[in-house]
Image (cartoon, rainbow, N blue to C red):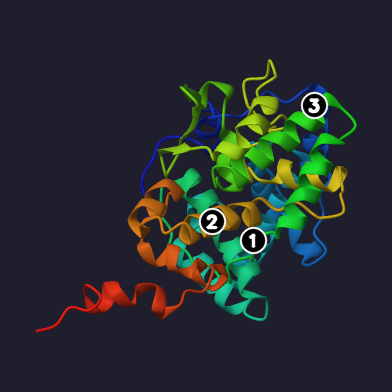
Amino acid sequence: MIKNTTETPTSRSSRPKPHARPINSSTAKKIDDAIENYVPIINRAAYATTGPLVREVVRAMAPTSYSNTRRLLSMVAGLVSWRWMHTGCDLTAERVFRDSTISLYVNTVLQSHSDVYRFDITRHLGAVTTRLTGERTSRLAPPPSQRLAPYTSAEMAQLHSWQIALSTAQARRNGAALLALGAGAGLTPAEIIAVRTSDIVVDGDRRWVTVRGASERSVPVSAKWIRTLGQALTTDEDLLFHGYEFEEYAPRPIQSFISAHPGPVRLTPTRLRSGWIVSLLNANVPLDVIAEVAGFTALASVTDYYAHASSTNINDYLDTITGVAGATR
């Protein structure tokens, strides 16, 4: 059942958003033009009727970049047009944005699309539904994925060379933040993008990163990356990685930065994190400790990385398995 509420979509969207930065007038106009002039490729005739609700919903979600505005328009327009053409329902957020409607839409209209695409559509439309109506929606299970292999030593050397050779001081600081927080502390892309300079804690020779959000924790930085972290900290910016302009998909600024500064080896924060976790496995750090510092809620998440860990030999643990060597009964 839809949650009854007296709030309008617009009033609900006006609440402050964590970490969001104000957008300039030029970007705001570009976003408004995108919303006003958008015409879908499919069901164009229906858009004359469904367009007003689509525009209202997208404006209520307050996107802060052109690319996210276009993506949101496409997703919302697809659902609204399909719902109206098949049921002729009143075009209100409460009638269109429902858990059951999204599930039916994804499992029929989008059934031929990839699991990743359907998962993404469900996630975004679910967020819209919860924000506009208060209804919690069910989500598809994340698509199965294999853990990325860590970088080799040679590749890490190339990444380090790439970082120190970047053309501007700001770019070098961003590169340092990615390497230090990814390879040195195993943070996810979304966690990297949210780290503030004040989240770095100095404890003698050690450095700790305070990670906020769903997986709040403190992570010690690997000693060999402390110098690189120091390079990232030479900034007056509040956020350690410069470029976080919007909240819809936090890791996107990282990908934009990497694409704008290509190197011989493409930097992927997920691979940096993988290498950090595998290095802890190779050092025989207990699984529960790894899970804690990595922000996992289940030990099974750690064991997924064993495929890339160093192989062990039973002879190395024979005495432990059998007891003290030479013991008799």
Circle 1: element type: loop
Is any atom of residue 1 visible in this view? no
Residue in the foreground of this view, choosing between 92 and 60: 60
Residue at far left of view:
329
Circle 2: element type: helix
Residue 173: % across, % down: 74, 29
The reply, left or right, for residue 39 in relation to residue 174 is: right
Circle 3: element type: helix
- Which residue is disc 1 drawn over? 150
Q: Earlier in the sequence, mark 1 or mark 3?
A: 1
Tags 2 and 1 in contact by the CB under 8 Å rule? yes
The tally of labels here is 3
Residue under the image location 63 percent in, 62 percent down: 79
Q: For marks 3 and 2, give the CA distance.
A: 29 Å
Q: Residues within 10 Å of mark 2 (few under 14, many from 20)?
A: some
Residue under the image location 58 percent in, 42 percent down: 184
- Which residue is disc 2 drawn over? 279
Q: For marks 1 and 3, give the CA distance.
A: 26 Å
- Which residue is disc 3 drawn over? 170
Quarter holding residue 77: bottom right
